[in-house]
Image (cartoon, rainbow, N blue to C red):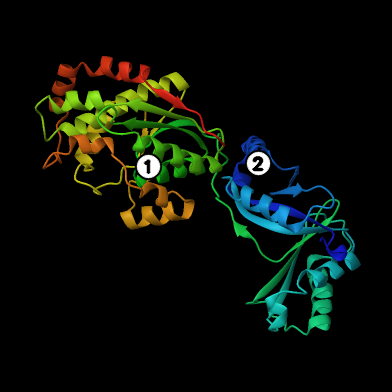
Amino acid sequence: MTMTALGEPSVLLKLGEVVLKGRNREIFEMRLRANIKHALKDHRVDIRQRHGVIALFLPAGTEVEEAEVVAARVADVPGIVLVHLAWRVAKDTDAITKAAIELIRDSDEVARKARFAVRSRRRDKRFPLRSNELDRVVGGAINDTYGLPVDLSNPELTVHIEVDKDEAFLFTGGRPGQGGLPVGSSGRALALLSGGIDSPVAAYRMMRRGLRVDFLHFSGIPFTTSESIYKAYALVRNLDKFQGKSRLWVVPFGKAQQSIKNSGQDRLAVIAQRRLMLKTAEEVAHRIHAEALVTGDSLGQVSSQTLTNITAQDHAVDLPILRPLIGLDKTEIMAEARRIGTLEISELPDEDCCTLLAPRQAETRAKIEDLKQIEKRLDAEDLAAQLADSIQPYKLDV
């Protein structure tokens, strides 16, 4: 049950680079509030803007467990740096002091006599006590009640107090948010999503930079099973927690791959396939008004991802290709995938469409003119348009 001295549970959201946006800051904050509202559509929450902080007020009588669920959900929303489960009390020195004593009463730090500090901040300068004066009052009461030693340099327990316009907030810890910019503040992009580890991480990283990301998956159907589609669907469902309203399209790519394989240019097949994928993705991007493509390329990670081959891929389309993983190694990418929850899905076995075109030795220095000759024989521009016409939408059940 909610303890009387602690008032009501609430959630405080600390913003990062959003507050540095100058005259455009209000636009970014409006986008962020809209994203928070969508993320919490299943919860009753009153969203209130403060200077550099967004406060989430929950209905009177809300249990702590519900507030914790809200805090965990909103921590996935890009644009937020820190999420604090806080207690909202009257803007009164006695009420704040009693709440601070109650807040830490059952903590492990009190049980083991840990070193502590009180950090106050007045957003409302009309409050009669300055921040350092409030620190001393509350800190003295905690010391008298529990006998904890004060350590302002390296405390093991910190009681935070934020005096706001109409109330005060108290909290002792928090969880990290995703940081970055609100999704949708930088435009829209289309991510080429394989069933592997890299592309979901690349998509996530671009979400954090404010892009709303749609997803395009190339399936080897009719020469492979639907396993890769199930994986793509599961990956998008997982990534949707960071942006909401995600969209997935699947291209049946097997017959086009077979045509490339039959072209007789075995060493160039992988790069030719990649260029056709990009051409198809560009056609789809134009139709959904996406302004860029996103891939999971990492320089030198595999033999086909050389600088020469990447340049040859760029030459295939006019839209910019964003490669947020270009300078990361596999260990770094896997660590990020594990953190955002996509690694376990990506490691599930499936029939990747790329296995249809696995030559003994891939070309590491593909020449654009040679690739153009293959594409001329395939009539690649028309083929890309046909592939774009064949895309199948998959609605997320979230």
The amino acid sitting under disc 1 is: Ser
List x then y, in percent, for residue 390.
36, 19
- Residue 199's disc number: 1
- Which of the 4 image quarters holds residue 231? top left
Q: Is residue 209 visible?
A: no
Q: Say whether residue 164 is left or right of residue 268.
A: right
CA separation, marks 1 and 2?
Answer: 25 Å
Task: Give the residue at x 70% y 84%.
Answer: 113
Task: Give the residue at x 84% y 64%.
Answer: 3
Q: Is residue 390 above or below residue 153?
A: above
Q: How many marks?
A: 2
Task: Give the residue at x 22% y 42%.
Answer: 307
Residue at image mark 2: 36
Instruction: Classify mark 1: residues with Cα within 10 Å, few (<14), some (14-19) or many (20+).
Output: many
**Residue farthest to the left, as pictured:** 264
Q: Say whether residue 286 is left or right of residue 134.
A: left
- Which of the 4 image quarters holds residue 195? top left
- Which of the 4 image quarters holds residue 234? top left
Q: Is residue 73 visible?
A: yes
List x then y, in percent, for residue 366.
15, 35
Q: Quadrant of the C terminus?
A: top right
The amino acid sitting under disc 2 is: Ile
